[in-house]
Image (spheres, coloured by chain):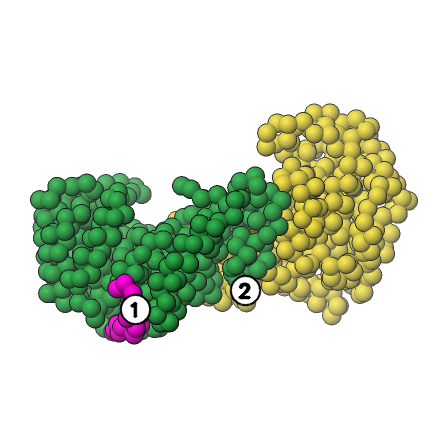
Chain colours: A green, B yellow
């Protein structure tokens, strides 16, 4: 079983530290989870993900259902064994991927019918099936099948999707799962405060092991996003972990924690690594820029990662411009190390009751960014 | 300076073990050199290349001259520092790449004019310039600029290219280089025994630190290739290392060593890794085959590499079919480990005076290949 306990509440903001106990290790929160949709954090060996300090990563039921198939993974001993990840795993149900990747054919009360983004084949996913797939994968935290409306949508659309998400959440909770597996509900409701409140209340009444906030960062303003986050958190039980799905610029982690978020996931550090964007304590840099051609400094002189300890910006730029795989790999490793370090610093700041000062320093470092540093995109 | 000493001569065949001493470590021969043309062994961290047991790798002056430029690398402390490789480096001059990749515009007595394969820009490379580039890179072993005729070619074409290669070799030898750098000559002559003999004699008379055999594996039969190799070796000084360029199936390593080759390089283990071919003690397997979908065995149960110690064939197949970068990386790591292990076994067999038995066992293991194993190309 998974359990969560709050350890320290911040005197400033709504932040707190906690421990998420799983059958595959204890996780200090607030935590960022690297994305490993297909059973691999793109480009990295699971040992490297560990080295960065991660003990919990995310995989995706939709992707693994399509390839190689959850039955195959179950036969081979489950996803932890399959991908040789000894830490904890959270699996997303795939509700969001069916909207974003697949051709969503029909949503009925029973479930959804979608066309695979790979070969156009038809598949049906029900709440029970979503749980069955995740049970087969053996993840530590399963996500309910939710119905995420598009952005923008009308209030009545949002209300309908919330009602359905609640009914599906109940069915997910009633579905069989393995003894070590927890289930998180997902709050929907688009940008409508009343609908978000109803969604959070209804899920809280069902009693989940944790609560995610879905359907954000889809195009609404940051102000709206944080308003919704704070509102939802005020409704959810304080004793349960709160997970903000798919949101994750460094600034978002700081702001999310400040408002009481315990868990994050985002493709940002991994995808940005593949496109040459590197996170540093003073901002982001785009490694392909000419100004780094003869720059022998590490990406971030303040970083202790295996990339910054050894390689120059000039070498990373060379690897990137020549499409060498090692470049993507080193960029990804650095970015994930940066994210892990940032979260560790945030936790330390909360424990030391200096989160407000930390937050100010975090932004100040970005303002004093050296002139050669490109920030953008 | 680089020095070479023969340690043990095999009682069977013309094989021998030796030690190549460089400013960046001592290398036991016979040795296989992984290819890192652009200053990276594709997909691997230099530490992983070391872990496999390699102490000498190959980079390419042609590629590094075009990107990022040898002056940039020199400014940044040389290629060892640039790519963070603490072992020894051999740089190929790029003569072969100008034939195979670039648009070779003109070969004159002075040198060659070629169009970059990247942007069509015009460049001139002379023997002196090839040495200047390699001196800037700071490699331990520099290769002369040679003139490799196409295959097939006429005997008079071969004779002309050998005469030019010899004159250029002399100019390379006279060009400035750094005190730790050795220069190897390259024997040409296509498939004509007399021309090959003349080439080897002429180069030996000039006195190089080592001798490469170029222009093979271009389409001639294996029998012809090994005849030429044996002939050339019989002419070259016994005290110098002999390097067979660009040849390297596992069978080729065994046969080359048998005939007296001390050094090999080939893209085979790295390129095959990228296309899903994995080398094992019983033959090659193509990891994408359906038969591995639920195969929880390692690639090669007899292999102790970091891939075989942890990951199943089923997982590697999944990574390959989903185009996940980690798949290519693990395949490459396994293949390079296989090659390093094979060379270590060959050296041990020579030292124990049992190379003939080793060679028989090597082929026997391939004949008893399990039925599921696909061998082919």
Residue A255 percent coordinates (x, y): 31, 56
Have a look at marks 1 and 2 and say if they share a chain. no
A94 displayed left or right of B222 = left
Residue A41 position within the rendered picture, expressed as x and y whole percent measured from the top left: 41, 56
Residue A5, magenta (yes or no) = yes
Q: Nearer the viewer, residue A276 or A117?
A: A276
Task: Tell me what residue is drawn at x 62 percent, y 39 percent.
Answer: B67
Q: Residue furthest right?
A: B205
> Looking at the picture, does residue B150 appear above or below residue B200?
above
- Would you say the magenta stretch is mainly helix, strand or loop? strand
Q: Is residue A241 above or below residue A149?
A: below
Q: Residue at x 65, y 60 (%)?
A: B54
Label 2 sits on residue: B305
Element type at mark 2: loop
Location of mark 1 (residue): A10
Nearer to me, B155 or B87: B87
Depth check: give the residue in front, B334 or B278.
B334
- Which numbered circle lies on residue B222? none
Q: Quadrant of residue A205?
A: bottom left
Would residue B197 be found to the left or right of residue A366 on screen?
right
Based on the displayed image, in which of its 4 quarters is residue A235 positioned? bottom left
Tell me the magenta residue range. Answer: A1-21
Magenta region includes residue A121: no
């Amino acid at each position: 079983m998974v359990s969560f306990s709050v350890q320290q509440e911040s005197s400033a903001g709504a932040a707190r530290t906690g421990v998420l106990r799983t059958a595959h290790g204890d996780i200090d929160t607030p935590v960022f989870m690297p994305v490993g949709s297909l059973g691999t954090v793109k480009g990295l060996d699971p040992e490297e993900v560990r080295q960065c300090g991660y003990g919990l990563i995310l995989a995706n039921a939709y992707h693994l259902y399509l390839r190689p198939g959850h039955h195959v993974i179950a036969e081979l001993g489950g996803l932890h064994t399959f991908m040789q990840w000894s830490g904890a795993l959270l699996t997303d149900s795939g509700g969001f991927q069916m909207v974003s990747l697949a051709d969503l054919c029909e949503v009925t009360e029973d479930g959804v019918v979608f066309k695979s983004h790979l070969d156009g084949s038809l598949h049906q996913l029900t709440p029970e099936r979503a749980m069955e797939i995740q049970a087969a994968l053996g993840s530590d935290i399963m996500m309910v099948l939710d119905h995420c409306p598009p952005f923008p949508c009308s209030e009545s659309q949002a209300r309908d999707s919330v009602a359905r998400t609640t009914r599906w959440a109940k069915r997910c909770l009633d579905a069989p799962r393995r003894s070590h597996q927890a289930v998180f509900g997902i709050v929907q409701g688009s940008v409508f405060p009343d609908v978000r409140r109803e969604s959070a209340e209804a899920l809280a009444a069902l009693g989940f092991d944790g609560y995610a906030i879905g359907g954000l960062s889809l195009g609404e303003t940051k102000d709206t996003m944080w308003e919704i986050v704070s509102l939802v958190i005020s409704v959810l039980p304080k004793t349960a972990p709160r997970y903000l799905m798919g949101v994750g610029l460094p600034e978002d982690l700081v702001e999310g924690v400040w408002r009481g978020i315990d868990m994050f996931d985002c493709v940002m550090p991994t995808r940005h690594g593949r496109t040459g964007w590197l996170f540093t304590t003073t901002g982001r840099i785009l490694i392909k820029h000419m100004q780094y051609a003869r720059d022998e400094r590490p990406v971030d002189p303040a970083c202790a990662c295996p990339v910054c300890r050894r390689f120059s910006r000039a070498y990373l730029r060379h690897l990137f411009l020549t499409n060498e795989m090692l470049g993507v790999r080193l960029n990804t490793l650095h970015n994930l190390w940066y994210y892990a370090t940032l979260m560790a610093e945030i936790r330390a700041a909360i424990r030391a009751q200096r989160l407000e000062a930390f937050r100010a320093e975090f932004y100040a470092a970005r303002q004093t960014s050296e002139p050669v540093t490109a920030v953008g995109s």
